[in-house]
Image (cartoon, rainbow, N blue to C red):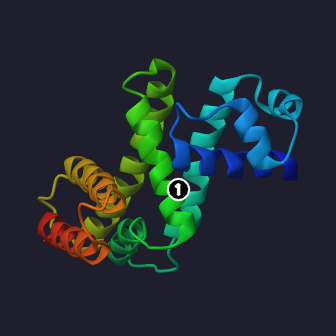
Amino acid sequence: MSERRTQILEAAVRVIAQDGVRGLRVEKLATAAEVSTALIYYHFKDRAGILHAALEHINHRAQSYTDTPTTDPRTQLEHMLLRELQDTPEVRETSIAWGELRASAAFNPDLREPLRTTTEAWNTDVESLIREAQDLGTVAATVDATATAERLTALVEGLSERWHSGSLDLTRARQLLTGAIELELG
């Protein structure tokens, strides 16, 4: 990816996190990215293209901070989910922008398919780790990996929203997630 495109996408994530999807205007994005509006249209064609590319960029950002260098799939799963709840600027911004995109999909049908696809990919990653842990005997074979993956990813999103909105502090959110992982995986 070109440096300019990355610069624009980083600015798009910032603007979405600060002002929501409805607050994302090409002119505002151009100012935030310190580029011309023409360059934005060159890279993304239209506002919908910006939103789709921003969603993809958010997913790549999340992968960069949730990957863990462990061979134990259960530990990898726990770390991956808990790393979604970190008090760092990148994680907060990524998580808030993700929540804004998800909330906007209720009113913007163009976002639904890419969000569904992205959510399914995340669920599949979690499910795969659960199945690997089952194969190693660190998660009970009776655990429904598909349903467990959906519940855990939905819980991460909900806890993240509550944390970002001030309804829950980060320590408590992480405690709740840790407890849920233990209950789900046994």
Q: Position of residue 164 (x, y in %)?
A: 37, 59
Q: Quadrant of residue 156?
A: bottom left
Would residue 85 appear left or right of 141 to someone viewing this image? right
Picture coordinates of residue 122, whole percent (x, y): 42, 49
Q: Using the image as rendered, state which of residue 70 and residue 153 is in the foreground.
A: 153
Seen from the viewer's position, the closer of residues 128 and 19 is 19
The residue that appears at 84% across and 48% down in the rendered structure is 34
Q: Position of residue 150 (x, y in %)?
A: 26, 48
Q: Evaluate whether residue 164 shows in this view.
A: yes
Secondary structure under the numbered disc 1 in the rendered image: helix
- Identify whether 174 is placed above or below 162: below
Give left or right: position of 140 versus 138: left
Q: Which residue is mark 1?
A: 94
Q: Is residue 84 left or right of residue 30?
A: left
Determine the residue positioned at 66% across, 31% down: 25
Q: Quadrant of the C terminus?
A: bottom left
Residue 38 x, y percent position in the rendering: 88, 28
- Identify the amino acid type marked 1: Thr
**Residue at point 51% right, 64% down?**
91
Q: Is residue 98 left or right of residue 60?
A: left
Asked where in the image residue 37 lies, by quadrant, the reply is top right
